[in-house]
Amino acid sequence: MRASQYLITTLKEAPAEAELISHRLMIRAGLIKRLGSGLYTWMPVGLKVLRKVEAVVRDEMAKTAKALELLMPAVQPAELWQESGRWEFYGKELLRLKDRHERDFVIGPTHEEVVTDVVRRDIKSYRQLPVNLYQIQTKFRDEIRPRFGVMRAREFVMKDGYSFHTDFASLEKTYWDYYNAYCNVFTRLGLKFRPVAADTGSIGGTGSHEFQVLADSGEDAIVWCPTSDFAANIELAEAVSPAHARPAAAESMTKVHTPGVKTIAQLADFLKIPVEKTVKAVVVDGVDGKPVLLMVRGDHSLNEIKAEKLPQVKSPLAFSTPESIVEAFGAAPGSLGPVNFPGTVIMDRTVDRMGDFVIGANEDDMHFTGANIGRDIPEPLVADIRNVVEGDQSPDGKGVLEICRGIEVGHIFQLRTKYSEAMQCTYLDADGQSVPMEMGCYGIGISRVVAACIEQNNDDKGIIFPAAMAPFTLAIVPVAADKNPQVAETADSLYQSLLAAGVDVLLDDRAERPGVKFADMELLGIPFRVTVGGKGLEKGIVEFAIRATGEVKELPVGEALALIQSNMAV
Amino acid sequence: MRASQYLITTLKEAPAEAELISHRLMIRAGLIKRLGSGLYTWMPVGLKVLRKVEAVVRDEMAKTAKALELLMPAVQPAELWQESGRWEFYGKELLRLKDRHERDFVIGPTHEEVVTDVVRRDIKSYRQLPVNLYQIQTKFRDEIRPRFGVMRAREFVMKDGYSFHTDFASLEKTYWDYYNAYCNVFTRLGLKFRPVAADTGSIGGTGSHEFQVLADSGEDAIVWCPTSDFAANIELAEAVSPAHARPAAAESMTKVHTPGVKTIAQLADFLKIPVEKTVKAVVVDGVDGKPVLLMVRGDHSLNEIKAEKLPQVKSPLAFSTPESIVEAFGAAPGSLGPVNFPGTVIMDRTVDRMGDFVIGANEDDMHFTGANIGRDIPEPLVADIRNVVEGDQSPDGKGVLEICRGIEVGHIFQLRTKYSEAMQCTYLDADGQSVPMEMGCYGIGISRVVAACIEQNNDDKGIIFPAAMAPFTLAIVPVAADKNPQVAETADSLYQSLLAAGVDVLLDDRAERPGVKFADMELLGIPFRVTVGGKGLEKGIVEFAIRATGEVKELPVGEALALIQSNMAV
């Protein structure tokens, strides 16, 4: 492609509201343009990146996941969502609308209902199963606060796959085919990523893995063990019980006045004790509507997803109001504890192994020191309700945990029969019995992959695209071609040779200063650049530069094509 | 692809509501599945057809139209439609919705507003023009009565292109590039089609061409001249004045009683005269709100689009109510005429050259015979207000007109400055003056092309796809492979060789009877079929069948690959 016939609209400045590096760089490089809140146009140079991601995904869907592509409508009748129960359950992120006849519809944020309807109409016999379908499609999710560009947009491109099976063994086989396909996709795209065990959240079902692109700015905390295969989203990662037993009580329990102390940090500071000697009290509504006291060590944090799954706790999780807390405990938050609290108390496993700790006394501005379970507090219910921290033992017992940040770009779920039961998606088995199908679903956020890639690969000059995702693999920059016809001739001849060799090459023949061209090609993240002109050309050489490393090589014009190809192949 | 690993869901019967052949066949062949009114899922085998159309379109967009692909959001802010004025103008076909913050949006049926917004933000100088962009995208149009499957669906796939220019000459150049690109697209897809001059309708602007796929069931009447290049939609085709002058009056005007005569056919029958001697009166509202009398020859029909463009006539066209007609004429419809009518009278060019004709007398159940312009009726306004009929002179004077039916699959428009003026999409010219851009827009109904193709190419066995659009180019049908291992071996070996040769081949290895397989492959419209098995194979031959002609050839197994390739190339 000749840049003079292309549309390159780079900007010096990113808009003020762009907080994330990838958002700023995508706007500055002209990959996307904002149309409205959470709505972006993919400009030609950005769409080229998106399409390269799509092509790799399609290839792996066919080869490794063995899925067939179809295309379902974006606009879906509300009846299907009522059938599955999600019409009520799904919040305002589901964009609902009425057609001219006042019938209810949604713009699909996901297609479980539609694909289940498609399959139940056509697939009747075990002989027709498994069925494995996917689409690449524009979705809509009415985010309350869209931000970060295409990272959390309202309209976005997604690959969503769905599989249907006679039994769980067949589902599991396809599930792992997708797992492998996703690993191949992100490897081929040149991304550093990690598959992690994940919570199944609102989609429901049993097993689930997320595929996380590693980046310091990632929203998700990923827990992993460098000495084993263990990796999980922090939402799910199990915090195991400490190896040691609960120590015997050494101190006696003493009530102390702690005026103005509201936080754990203030408490440790006031009492001049390590924060690990304190216990934090969190009060949530129980299934019976009464407050439930959850206890984690002072330096730990409650894992709300784990808490929500406790049978004693109301779902979705609701923190108790200050009024109901005062009524139940006789004190305001900041001084709460289990002593003399008649309700349900659930302690984290780590708290269960503590002795002589400090805890609120259920009187405002009062705490107990030297509290001990058994002696001062009845044996409580114990559960894993905290987030793991670095240095915790890995749940597989094979090392200690580390935590890094990631951006979720893929997610696979074993849905089991959640939708097929609700929507009567059944097949006749060999005995003529009607059985609900086992089901899996598998997503990749295609547009999000582009943002995540940039979040992972950038420097102060701009984007550093891996070759597989770059809008162009190589840019040729002629310098001062208007003053020396040999520059244009050499650049053009090289351009033609590279095109013929199948290289996705951009010839920057724009009437711009060399500095502008270099800056644009760097901002766009084009992996390789050949500069033609100046003293080098007089000596018969062109300059070959590698965006990721900054390395520059001089290549003799006569051998340039072959040397460029071998240098790009490295 | 092996059929056993594919999803073929053909049906014996089409649903009762499917009126059109293409709709019936697409449902029966399992290309599409209905989700709701005007909403269809493209099943894998149908999507493959759609994608082949898209690929040809993309190639011609890049090569011939020289356009760059981008992707704009489907959901568009209402503000842009308010800016262009179409928020008010566009009817209920525009699906409007509110997001969670109660802001107004539309699901785009077209993207003039969005692309104009994209361009006005980035393109500031004449040096950046022309800009030529297109997308292939899912659109939504809330049809009041969706029908005919994907021919008139609510959600559909469209290629929409938009170009921006400094001047009309540049617009015209790009307009003809698109014209050529569209001709190439439909030629490459193997369709019989015709580009025709067209009305610009609600899109506005000046020049316009439609691309019509010829089919007897088409909604559009296409007028063309076999001895010249003339072709136009009947909406636009000019009916020229008869070559002869107006004859002198021979009869005297006589009032006759025509009891119960309401239609032209009844009138000619009652008076025992040729229908060509009668004149039809149509009354519409004028710009001043008063009735305007339009007159066309009895056997001709009023062209409403031409009538609407008359300066004396209100737009949009409104037929006058019976009450206002009786008030203005003193008679009810069926007996209306120009004699003693004091209002505006506009005659078609053909009526202007008639003498001694029959016309309503403005008294119920009364007509005049022997009426003549000049003597009995004042010289009226004359205009082209009728539809042409077969046998009319071509407007280019190079022959006589014929009429055929077509399905509109493409439309190109010179929009000029309609949107750029309304939305301040301007550039700075060489003198630093701000000038609105000239604009063109160019659409292809991608999903409609598939339906139109089937409407044109089918028989009682099913679809007859041209090779360029077929889901598979060739099907191999092994017969009774379970009884003879040589059948499976030969079929499989041929399948592998054809795949390696780049042929898009389907091996029908399903455990079905041969009759079912043959019927499915014919219904699906696969252009070529190779049958392996039976007595033929014992003699060392396979059978090669051509779907379009029904021709069958016997090919020696050893030479099958080469002979299949040469036969397909014909």
Image (cartoon, coloured by chain):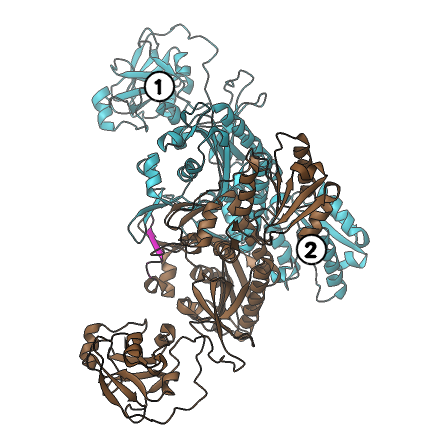
Chain colours: A brown, B cyan
Question: Which one is in front in this view, the residue at disc 1 or the one at disc 2?
Answer: 2
Q: Secondary structure at mark 1?
A: strand
- Do circles 1 and 2 both sit on a common chain? yes
| Nearer-the-camera pick, A313 or B59 | A313
Q: Is residue A497 left or right of residue B104?
A: right
| Disc 2: which residue | B476
| Percent x, y of residue B171 | 49, 27
Amino acid type, callout 1: Met
Identify the residue shown where x is 38% and y is 76%.
A306
Left or right: A150 as drawn, with respect to B58? left
Could you tell me which quadrant the N terminus of chain B lies in?
Answer: bottom right
Chain designation of label 2: B
Rendered position, A215 above or below A531: below
Q: Position of residue A478 (x, y in %)?
A: 62, 37
Quarter in which the C terminus of chain B is drawn: top right
Q: Nearer the viewer, residue A477 or A107?
A: A477
Can the viewer see residue B454 in this picture?
no
- Point out which mark residue B18 bears: none
Q: Position of residue A346 (x, y in %)?
A: 32, 83
Magenta stretch: helix, strand or loop mostly: loop
Identify the amino acid type marked 2: Ile
Residue A335: quadrant of the picture = bottom left
Residue farthest front in this picture? A272
**Residue at point 31% right, 80% down?**
A272
CA neighbours of label 1 inside 10 A, class few (<14), some (14 to 19), many (20+): many
Quadrant hosting residue A558: top right
Span of residues in magenta? A91-100
Q: Which residue is mark 1?
A: B295
Residue B183 vs A38, above or below: the answer is: above
Q: Residue B195 vs residue A421: left or right?
A: right
